[in-house]
Amino acid sequence: MASNLSFVLNKPNDVTFEERPVPKLQNPHDVLVAVNYTGICGSDVHYWVHGAIGHFVVKDPMVLGHESAGTVVEVGPEVKTLKKGDRIALEPGYPCRRCGSCLSGHYNLCPDMVFAATPPYHGTLTGFWVAPFDFCYKLPENVSLQEGALIEPLAVAVHIVKQARVQPGQSVVIMGAGPVGLLCGAVARAYGATKVVAVDIVQAKLDFALSYAATHTYMSQRVSPEENAAALIKSADLGAGADVVIDASGAEPSIQAALHVVRMGGTYVQGGMGKADITFPIMALCLKEVTARGSFRYGSGDYKLAIDLVAAGRVDVKKLVTGVVPFEDAEEAFKKVKEGQVIKILIAGPNEKVVQGMDTSVDEKKLQQAQAAGSTGCC
Ligand SMILES: NC(=O)c1ccc[n+]([C@@H]2O[C@H](COP(=O)([O-])OP(=O)(O)OC[C@H]3O[C@@H](n4cnc5c(N)ncnc54)[C@H](O)[C@@H]3O)[C@@H](O)[C@H]2O)c1
Ligand SMILES: OC[C@H](O)C(O)[C@@H](O)CO
């Protein structure tokens, strides 16, 4: 019998492996999926370390993980578009489909969203997962299951870039060169941005960003937001400022600088999640008539576009995978993410044979120095 071993967070810094019953289809439209690979997101690490994100508090043991791809092993009687053996990327949040947000096409804003590894709901670091068929996206032949596990963070980036309304020829500055910021850069390039400036406080991350999708990089300094913005604009030759600035860091100094980097009439998008309240330069927002938008998870068409971008070779997600580890090494992998030693690490499902070990291709020394200085990651 295949294992339904699950990686369970009991309370902060206390995780265990638990053999849980294989879930059953709840609805004729459901499919049962064997989870092949799951990426670790900063939010998983945040729950592991702190037991909460904002008002989402882990009160009962919760299975972690939500960035998964898997193989269909059973389909409900009403499922017409998927069959046993299909390889899929799993969209991990299921909206009510009936509220005003859902009916207006913004299901990511559904107040009754059931989202994997967001308490009280269990996540996908488990052997088997039940999902509505229309939240399972069949992977094209040329997209691997490991790439499939990266579709979730790529969909986050797709949604952010859509919110930014990036146009061909535009300049886009991205604060934060973690997985989300890197992927925003790649999607912005796919949308035709000609200048993509990656901003971070860790040189190794900037080096990677330049080898990935960024055309320019800028190392944020410990100076005022105005000074940082002026130096950034000069170093990337942005003239009167960037057409679009995206925050993918959640860090207050980066958000403050962003409003001084964006041009008159430009667009600012908040993708990063950090402190709930910060000091925000409202005068710059007002006087420059900046369009500011939030971005939360992903909605209609985002998963499909993310898969199409990978299948068409427009976004390379493989490059972000630092390593793949067996299921029993999940806690070790979480430690590596917390310490900022990896870009994206995949955990193989409990029924999956691992093909490669952990390869920390990022400059570990520099990342460790930065981590010692308390500067990386969301935790
Ligand atoms: N909006 C959403 O739906 C959504 C979804 C997933 C993740 N997120 C958020 O997006 C952000 C990025 O996610 P990630 O997985 O890439 O996280 P990450 O922690 O790997 O990346 C954040 C990056 O920001 C950098 N940084 C920190 N302070 C900075 C500063 N002052 N200036 C510039 N860069 C700075 C860090 O060094 C790091 O490289 C996080 O805040 C995460 O919570 C949002
Ligand atoms: O990619 C999805 C995100 O990780 C989640 O929305 C999380 O950050 C908040 O629940």
Image (cartoon, rainbow, N blue to C red):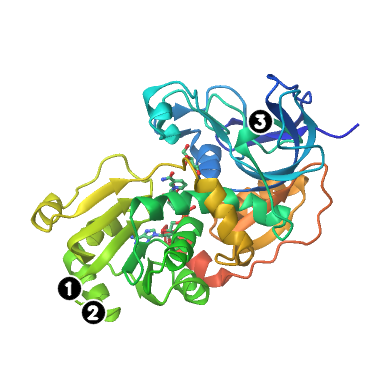
Eye-nearest disc, 2 or 3: 3
Label located before the other in sequence (2 or 3): 3
Disc 3 element: strand
Q: Quadrant of the N terminus?
A: top right
Q: Quadrant of residue 223?
A: bottom left
Q: In the displayed structure, would residue 180 be above or below residue 365?
A: above
Q: Is residue 194 visible?
A: yes
Which numbered circle lies on residue 131?
Answer: 3
Query: In this rendering, would 191 be left or right of 330?
Result: left
**How far across and how far down the image is residue 295, in percent?**
37, 45
**How far across and how far down the image is residue 33, in percent?**
74, 36
Q: In the displayed structure, would residue 276 be above or below residue 113?
A: below
Disc 2 element: helix
**How far across and how far down the image is residue 189, in percent?**
44, 68
**Mark 1 lies on residue:** 240
User: Mark 3 is on which residue type?
Assistant: Ala
Q: In the displayed structure, would residue 25 be above or below residue 375?
A: above
User: Mark 2 is on which residue type?
Assistant: Lys
Which numbered circle lies on residue 234?
Answer: 2
Q: Residue at x 73, y 34 (%)?
A: 6
* In-front residue for pair 119/58: 119
How packed mark 3 is, by other alpha carbons closer than 10 Å (few <14, some 14-19, many 20 or more), is many
* In-front residue for pair 355/25: 25
